[in-house]
Image: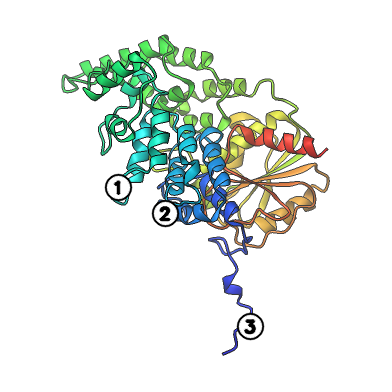
Amino acid sequence: MRMNILNLKHRPRTHEGAPAKRLTAEQELRRSVLSCMLWENQFYEDGVEIAGRVAELVPKVDADCVAALAVEAREKMKLRHVPLLLVREMARHATHSALVAETLERVIQRADELAEFVAIYWAGGKQPLSAQVKKGLAAAFVKFDEYQLAKYDRAGVVRLRDVLFLSHAKPLNDAQAELWKRLVANELATPDTWEVALSESGRGEGAGGEAGSAKRDVWERLLAERSLGALALLRNLRNLHQAQVDEKFVFDALAEMKTARVLPFRFLAAARVAPQWEEELEKAMYRSLEGRAGTLAGHTLLLVDVSGSMEATLSRRSEMRRTDAAYGLAILLREIAEKVTIFTFSDEAKRVPARRGMALRDALNKNQPHGGTNFGRALSQVEGECRDYDRLIVITDEQSHDQVGAPRGKGYVINVASFKNGVGYGPWTHVDGWSEAVVEYIAELENSVD
């Protein structure tokens, strides 16, 4: 039987059929991790498949790279679960286990992540924790005070006191030793959080309108005291509206919220659930962009994927969509780039009117039907229409129908999904995930080259 036959079926392809780039194990791991809401189903792949791919790739990637990726996922991309999975997989392999303790201590930044890690470790059945895992958990445990431990000591398969016993953590001082005794005895002081306050107000909910009134009073007190952080405020706008909170409290809170670390896509997601407060949300969004004009010099082309798969939510518990990330980046670039020309693409590319803020979001969303993903055709159309540009930025899930060529100049593909194969490599600078660092990364990269 003749074996020396070219088999094109072995070439990797996107889920929509375009030829994809062959990646190193490290590149595959990065694209699987940095946009990953662990165990959440996505448009083309389910969460179990993604988690299994991560586990398969970890031993194929150098231990230092896996550890650095876990830290990057937690600290830059603000992901919580997938960094824990990376460390758990590191603990399985002698080639990676030496870095487990220091990496685990670094990626655990909330007290509930102590118990979450042990739950992940035991996902296939209970087993003894490795020495490096115990060391990492013990080092992380001492970081948390009574408020943090009480806030996140939740009922579950693993409790925080279980982690304390399993890790044999040593208190730093007598005060911490007493704190841990109260944790074990379930005698921690009830934390003064907005979640607790609302839970208390909801007791006796069968008493007609009294419970609803109590909840409204609590929300208004929390707003007046500025007890809600920026993200908590944005995520609870629907609850505030349903509780019939006086709009004055909402408007004042939005006007004074700290916006420096809030990206535009957060405001877009909030405006979808609370459209009656869109004007105030837009004002807050503009404040988040102040002082950043001129970050990218020259002419920027932005190509935004509006295909059907981009309409998927980030997770089943989230109303935020991948289009929110894409539209948010467009709004950001409109404000901070010296000159920007924006196109959407689905079955074809189409120029977007030069609008700002929420009006730009609407223009992007209504610009064309949300169908297939013809990235290659869109690239040809855009470069034919705009021959002179300094950089081309594409934000997409990379699941193209057609083959994608090289950009004429500097080209960046920002990948917002965890699908196995992608097209934005080779002549493209590939960026997995999105955060406040995306635009700064591009600017710094170009400055370092220049």
Q: Position of residue 88 (x, y in %)?
A: 42, 45
Residue at 56% across, 51% down = 307
C-alpha separation, residue under disc 1 versus residue under disc 2: 27 Å
Mark 1, residue position:
127
Tag 1 secondary structure: loop
User: In the rendered view of the protein, which quadrant contains the N terminus?
Assistant: bottom right
Sequence-wise first label, 2 or 3: 3
Mark 2, residue position:
46
- Residue 74 at least partly seen: yes
In screen coordinates, is 195 left or right of 45? left
User: In the rendered view of the protein, which quadrant contains the C terminus?
Assistant: top right
Out of 108 and 77, give the one closest to the viewer. Answer: 108
425 shown above or below 276? below
Q: Position of residue 99 (x, y in %)?
A: 50, 41
Question: Tag 3: residue type?
Answer: Asn
Mark 3 Cα shell of 10 Å, populated few (<14), some (14-19), many (≥20): few
Question: Tag 1: residue type?
Answer: Gln
Q: Position of residue 203 (x, y in %)?
A: 20, 20
Mark 3, residue position:
4
Residue at 64% across, 31% down = 332
Q: Hey, which quadrant is residue 111 in on the image?
A: top left
Question: Tag 2: residue type?
Answer: Asp
Sequence-wise first label, 3 or 1: 3
Out of 410 and 118, give the one closest to the viewer. Answer: 118
- Numbered label attached to residue 118: none
Q: Look at discs 1 and 2 and give the one toward the viewer.
A: 1
Q: Hey, which quadrant is residue 212 in on the image?
A: top left
Mark 2 Cα shell of 10 Å, populated few (<14), some (14-19), many (≥20): some
In screen coordinates, is 373 left or right of 182? right
In screen coordinates, is 116 left or right of 156? right
C-alpha separation, residue under disc 3 versus residue under disc 1: 47 Å
